[in-house]
Amino acid sequence: WNPVFTDLLATGSGDASARIWKMGGTKAKDGKDRSRLLPHGTDASDKKNKDVTTLEWSSNGELLATGSYDGVARVWSRTGAIVHTLRGHLGPIFSLKWNKRGNFLLSGSYDKTTIVWDVSGQTGVIKQQFHHHTAPALDVDWKDDLTFASCSTDKTVLICRVGSDRPLFHLTGHKDEVNAVKWDPTGTLLASCSDDSTAKVWDISSGLSQPLHDFASHSKEIYTVKWNPTGRMLATASFDGSVRLWNVENGSCISVLSRHRDSVYSVAFSPSGNYLASGSLAGQLYIWRVSDGQHIKNFRGRGDIFEVAWNKEETRIAACFSSNVVNVIDFNS
């Protein structure tokens, strides 16, 4: 969902395209107005290996960045015009993030590198490329406008800064590939999760190379982690079919949300932090009340759910499915 122009929803697909959808009204039954196609290839032969793997709106809502299997990052206006085509990676892009200021775009790739792109001028250029991982970089996340974390199948998490040739921190402790990294809203604590079935929380301000917390009660791989809006709670989503909520102040498990029968690929806190949406394989979407861990709504679609997202007003949830469909669900109805 666009953070400013909140009736706009961006989606990326394995058909070598992204789309920007405009909602027709405030309710799902109002349908959609129109969608703008953002093509990542010119014809059938050119669309090979151009699956859209990741996308993100800039914080002012004016620009959409898309990353693709062809290793190219693209920046589009919210009206669907191409603004920048960023070539520099030698393999698929797995993660793309804007810094808050909106002058830098950060990408992580299968080619083991991360690139900070300067997109403040007429043409986007490589500000700095980081070659510190020894295997594909799976996720990236900004701490502030210059400092970021990256994680890799090399089992490490690195913290790097624009202008610095060496990583500031090299966090080891995971025993298998690290799938995601996320800074808390203040940029103080970093969460990471791994195929080793653990999630870890790191406090780099303490100078410690050991994690502050090591959450080890999932029985299978953890695919993603999300912070609640206050940064006091962390959600972990696992292939064991459960979502767990953790108190980050004392390291305790607050709730185990366990209605899913299949791997959970996506979780999202609502903007207020009062609710959590989770989506799994076999198309099951649940919405949970965070205060007591109760499930209050569910939706079943066709295919597997790869991502769930709340709009800013907390009135609707979007879920994207392997069946080439995006569902928009009214929360209040």
Image: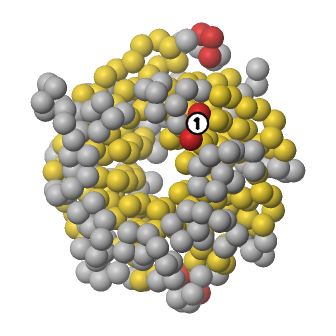
Query: Closest to the observer: 31 or 135?
Result: 135
Q: Residue 154: x, y in percent?
A: 37, 74
Q: Which amino acid does the dot numbered 1 rest on?
A: Ala
The residue located at (62%, 16%) in the rendering is: 28
| Visual colour scheme | secondary structure
Q: Residue 143 appears at what percent x and percent y?
A: 48, 66
Look at mark 1 in the image and give the residue it sits on: 282
Residue 26, compared with residue 223, is above or below; it is above
* Residue 75 higher or lower than 190, as above or below: above
Task: Kindly state the secondary structure of the residue where label 1 is placed.
Answer: helix
Quadrant for residue 20, please give it. Answer: top left
Residue 85: which quarter of the image? top left
Q: Residue at image x 66%, y 73%?
A: 216
Image coordinates for residue 47, horizontal then vertical, percent: 19, 32
141 horizontally vs 240: left or right: left
- Say whether residue 60 is visible: yes
Give the left or right position of residue 16, taking residue 25 as reference. left
The part of the image, by quadrant, that contains residue 247 is bottom right
Q: Give the total number of marks visible in the rendering.
A: 1
Horizontal side of 170 relative to 227 (left or right) equals left
In the foreground, 42 or 196: 196
Relative to 196, residue 49 above or below: above
- Choose between 25 and 51: the one closer to the eye: 51
Nearer to me, 219 or 95: 219
Could you tell me if residue 231 is visible in this image? no
Q: Tell whether 201 sits left or right of 296.
A: left
Q: Residue at x 34, y 20 (%)?
A: 36
Give coordinates of residue 309: x percent, y percent: 57, 38
Q: Residue at x 55, y 48 (%)?
A: 265
Bin the neighbour count of mark 1 within 10 Å (Cα to Cα): few under 14, some 14-19, many 20 and up: some
Q: Quadrant of the C terminus?
A: top right
